[in-house]
Image (spheres, rainbow, N blue to C red):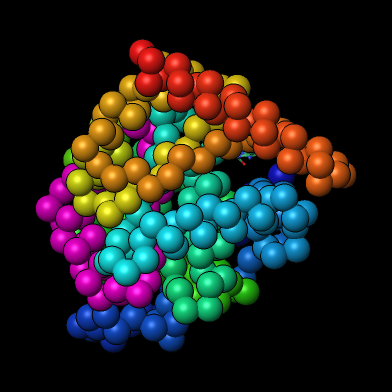
Amino acid sequence: MATPAPAPVPEPPLPPPGTPLGEIRYTVTATVPVDREWLKRHRLITGVEEDPVLEAYKLLRTQILQRTRGEQKNLLMVTGPQPGEGKTLTAVNLALSLSREVDKTVLLVDADLRNPTVHTCFGLRPAFGLVDYLQGTKAIPELLLHPEGFPRFVLLPGGRPVAEAAELVSSPMMAALVQELKNFYPDRYVIFDLPPLLTYADALAFAPLADGIILVVEQGRTTREDLGRALQLLKDFPILGTVLNKVPETPSRSYEEAAGRREENGRWWHRLRRRLSAA
Ligand SMILES: Nc1ncnc2c1ncn2[C@@H]1O[C@H](COP(=O)(O)OP(=O)(O)O)[C@@H](O)[C@H]1O
Ligand SMILES: [Mg+2]
């Protein structure tokens, strides 16, 4: 069956001229309706899915909360070695999972300006995004979207794809935006979704701005060499966690089987790490 095209996003109401970033409230952020079936089809966690998936993201959320607690480490970036390994889906579901913590709000920024897809995960088709801010034609409050039914979650889409993504992502304007977001929202997590590390310069150029990095690798696809190269490139930056994506799941399996599978995956991961450290 053909997948229907994402819905166009209605023009957001404009904030009053001169509205500082710190005063952004849901009143000036466009609330957009989302189709729950679309979200499910695109594997977004909506709170009703099978336990293992929800639990996996809760575990990641807990690790992030523990590793950022007490310090102002609220600006995170998600990347991985190659395209298609699940960076965007991980960024979206981590953001949604964090926003379910009662005292946390989350801003998810699509900083993959070559191939912005975060809005597609929500079935949205916004006319503008981060690229328009970085090119000086839009203000941030005009660009923020609040998908209906996700309290404490706001999205800054990427906008139309551009070739000069690395330049924009490493521009002084981006650095200033990051500082502004960080300082205005000390109790908010800001999560940036970046392009693949080994294919483009963008993610490495952005790394110095982030308080923590989440590295996504795909089981059975990410090679040892690629993971090694990614870790080497990021060796001077804080990696908060590594996500092993697309581990095969059998929803009906028993707790014992699940524990066994985790063991197996753990061993796979350890073997990989041992080989890496021995290299
Ligand atoms: N754990 C998973 N299980 C099944 N499909 C997945 C999983 N993670 C990602 N995908 C799918 O794989 C494709 C690529 O994922 P995406 O997050 O866009 O990758 P990236 O951002 O690394 O290029 C998407 O269609 C996504 O829905
Ligand atoms: Mg992506």
Q: Can residue 251 be seen in this view?
A: no
* Image quarter hosting the C terminus: top left
Residue at left 41%, top 25%? 227
Tell me if 7 is positioned left or right of 19 in this view.
right
The image shows residue 58 at horizontal and vertical percentages of 59, 58
Indicate the quadrant where residue 235 lies: top left
* Residue at the far left in the pictured view: 172
Tell me if 218 is positioned left or right of 13 in this view.
right
Span of residues in magenta: 168-197
Instruction: Please say if 90 is above or below 216.
Output: below
Instruction: Please say if 279 is above or below 107.
Output: above
The image shows residue 51 at horizontal and vertical percentages of 75, 55
Residue at left 56%, top 71%? 100
Residue at left 44%, top 73%? 105
Based on the picture, tell me whether residue 187 belongs to the magenta stretch.
yes
Instruction: Please say if 96 is above or below 251.
Output: below
The image shows residue 267 at horizontal and vertical percentages of 60, 27
Q: Is residue 174 visible?
A: yes
Instruction: Please say if 75 is above or below 187.
Output: above
* Image quarter hosting the N terminus: top right
Between 8 and 117, the one nearer to me in the picture: 117
Tell me if 59 is positioned left or right of 137 in this view.
right
Residue at left 29%, top 84%? 23
* Residue at the far top in the pictured view: 279
The image shows residue 108 at horizontal and vertical percentages of 42, 60
Tell me if 172 is positioned left or right of 146 in this view.
left
